[in-house]
Image (cartoon, grey):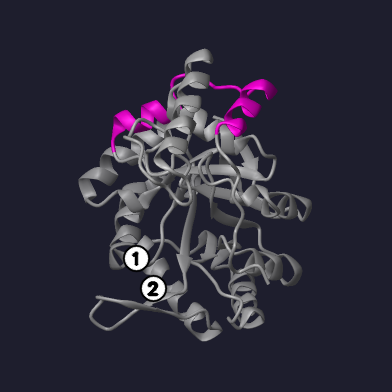
Amino acid sequence: MQYHTLGNSDLQVSEISLGCMSLKTAEAFQQMIPQALDVGINFFDTADLYDQGQNEVLLGKALGTHRKEVIVASKVGNQLNADGTSWSWNPSKAYILTAIDASLKRLGTDYIDLYQLHGGTIEDPIDETIEAFETLKQQGKIRAYGISSIRPNVIQEYVKRSNIASNMMQYSLLDRRPEETALDLLHQNNISVITRGTVAKGLLAGKPATVYLAHSEERVQAASEAIHQVAQQNQQTTAQTCARYVLQHPAVASAVMGFRTIEQLKNGIGTNEFAHLSDSDYQALQNSVEAKVYDKHRV
């Protein structure tokens, strides 16, 4: 497993990370976490919203004595109502400074390595949100902070006004929108990208083709076939090749993979290190599907 420094922080994260949202039971966590650690994964992503906070609880318990060895990321901004059936967006400083304590308690830890704003709009009180994260760093409750956003205008504002270490964003061969401006902008400002949706809901890893974003079923099928062909040539699994595609850009520090089973974990990681794609393989993948652009949230 290779490791990368996360932006301007001192966090060293595995280039494949475990997205915990897909794990729903204590048994699933207890089976998956040791296996993930064994293959070198040290970066685990959760959020206070997942399963009304229970995802944090289960992750904390499963990590147990390994807590100091790993990087735990969580998210904030979606405030549950009193009975937990719905939520509202709340990026205020007051809420963030309160929500952190609840997450720390659920995780069973006294700090979170990476605390992320779980979304964001251009209408948010951005400076106030940044103040909250900076306060938490000063208090030692978090080691670094970032955002989780695909909106170009929000990303641009945080690049200009904050010290974020990372931005989590959807990125895959079937969602190349980050390639337009976001990846280079973040890289130039020493902000790492954490990708999600790396296998495009499984469409790039064996699921039957269907319409995805602005791509027709035929274009999805073409992208899937291209991934499969490159994977075969390089003696990789399709999941490995999907990960290698997004990791090819120097801005990307880690690809979050939502492994639900040990088999998926093994297919995604493999038993050996897998090299970067050749220029010709990378170009072949890009030629298989048109790159779209974000047509909203630009200014």
Q: Residue at x 37, y 48 (%)?
A: 63
**Position above or below: 281 against 37:** above
Q: Quadrant of residue 149?
A: bottom right
Q: CA distance from mark 2 to mark 1?
A: 6 Å
- Graded by Cα atoms within 10 Å as few (under 14), some (14 to 19) or many (20 or more), the crowding at tag 1 reads some
Q: Which residues are magenta?
A: 261-288
* Callout 2 amino acid: Ala
Determine which residue is flagged by label 1.
106
* Callout 1 amino acid: Arg
Pinpoint residue 75: horizontal percent, then vertical percent. 47, 64
Quadrant (top left/top right/bottom left/bottom right) for the N terminus: top right
Circle 2: element type: helix
Pinpoint residue 89: horizontal percent, then vertical percent. 44, 78
Pinpoint residue 47: horizontal percent, then vertical percent. 41, 62
- Label the magenta part by its dominant secondary structure: helix
Magenta run includes residue 126: no
Determine which residue is flagged by label 2.
102
Q: Tell whether label 1 touches label 2 (CB within 8 Å).
A: yes
Q: Residue at x 43, y 23 (%)?
A: 237
Q: Residue at x 44, y 39 (%)?
A: 199
